Amino acid sequence: MKKKEKLFLAVILLAGFIMRLFGLINIRLGGDFAYHWEVAGSIAKGENFPLLGPAASINPDFHLGPFYYYFLAIPYFLGAGNFKVAIVFFSLISSISIYFLYHLSREWFSEEESLKVTALYAFSSYMITTGNFPWNAYLVPLVVILILLLLTRLKKGRHKYIVPLAFLYAVGLQLHATVILLTPLLLLAIPYKKIKIKYLILSLVVFVLIISPWLVVEFGSGFEQTKNLFSTLFVADSDCVFSEWIVSHGHGERCFHYFRNTLFIFRLFSVSLFVSTNFWLVILTFLVSIHTLFLSENPARKFFITWLTGVFILYLFYSANIYLHYMLILVPLPFFVMGMFLQRIEKPRNGKLLSNLIFVLMIANNLVHFLISLRDIRI
């Protein structure tokens, strides 16, 4: 890595961290955050050690694993109960994901292109707001980035990395249940036959140990959590009128899930890159993304298609309530796709100028929207 690129990366990391710290202005202690903070406090004080984690948004009777509560207890302890320390702590964690994203990008992009991908992620209004807010689901992008980075190391023969990968996968499942949708990608990408059996066994042991608190409760309660989950998944759709739904659909509804889930996937792309969930912009983002993925000459093209396709197919079977954060398992794919798009448009005459112009305008648009959003209180 050249000195100039190191300087650019340092500037991106510092600026990204500072932007995330702006959460100190408009984030308040309330809602789920207030409850989670109380539980974290009980852990930090040694008063309570829960075996279950936060309730899932799909069903308040279904709980995730407890990892997040214990993780949140760290800033509680460091800040002596001051919730603003958690905002700083999560902003720092999110900034660390920027650093790892650069190194992941270097597996498939040049230094300059990797810096662009990293900057788009670092200054994405949506990623800033998810990066500085203390909530279990918002740690998923970091986990996904680290899992992908470990996959690249496994492919290079560093087979011992299967152990931390198993740890991260177990952690991810406790942060948000949608991490299970990464399973097809992992099954296809991990070179199991080449990995020594001792590493496979150790990784399995680590995985079971990390999720064991949840398993203990599940087995002890007669699979109560699983029953709660399935009772939600298989509820009939409410009355839906397509002409009305296409205009007003938003968070939580159960209508037209085949079409809805696809929209939500590319709504994530649209809001991450362009700070908008406008229906027509989502459709345009979908068309450009698919065109870019299938025609790009980037060596990661097939890997990205497998990742997106696996999530897309599994969501075809999901008809329950859905929210935008359910798609965070696809981060940082939107930024990789945009990086590939910028690669493609550089080739024609004056393409470099156009590519740089689009890049700068996207950064500016995201930062302006983020700064304006600071007027809104978040709890």
Image (cartoon, rainbow, N blue to C red):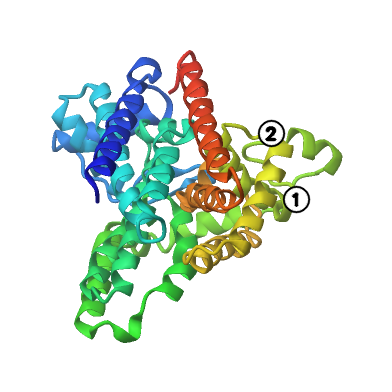
In this picture, is 214 found above or below 91? below
Report whether 80 appears left or right of 149: left
Q: Residues within 10 Å of mark 1 (few under 14, many from 20)?
A: some
Tell me if I can see residue 210 in this picture: yes
Q: Nearer the viewer, residue 344 or 227?
A: 344
Where disc 2 sits, the SS reads loop
Counting every numbered tag in the picture gives 2
Q: Is residue 106 above or below residue 54?
A: below
Return the residue found at the far top: 375
Vertical relation: 344 (above or below) 69: below
Q: Nearer the viewer, mark 2 or mark 1?
A: 2
Label placed on residue 278:
2
Quadrant of the image for the C terminus?
top left
Q: Residue 37, image x and y in percent?
A: 29, 30
The three-letter amino acid code for the residue at tag 2 is Asn
Circle 2 packing at 10 Å, graded few (<14), some (14-19), many (20+), is few
- Badge 1 amino acid: Phe
Q: In what element is the residue under mark 1?
A: loop
Answer left or right for 28 relative to 335: left
- The residue at the point 75 percent across, 33 percent down is 248
Give the residue pinned by disc 1.
256
Instruction: Report the disc number at residue 195.
Output: none
> How far is mark 2 from mark 1, CA to CA?
18 Å
Q: Position of residue 229 (x, y in %)?
A: 52, 55
User: Residue 261's x, y, as percent?
Assistant: 65, 51
Identify the residue at image location x=70%, y=44%. Answer: 284
Q: Quadrant of residue 122?
A: top left
> Residue drawn 23% across and 84% down?
196
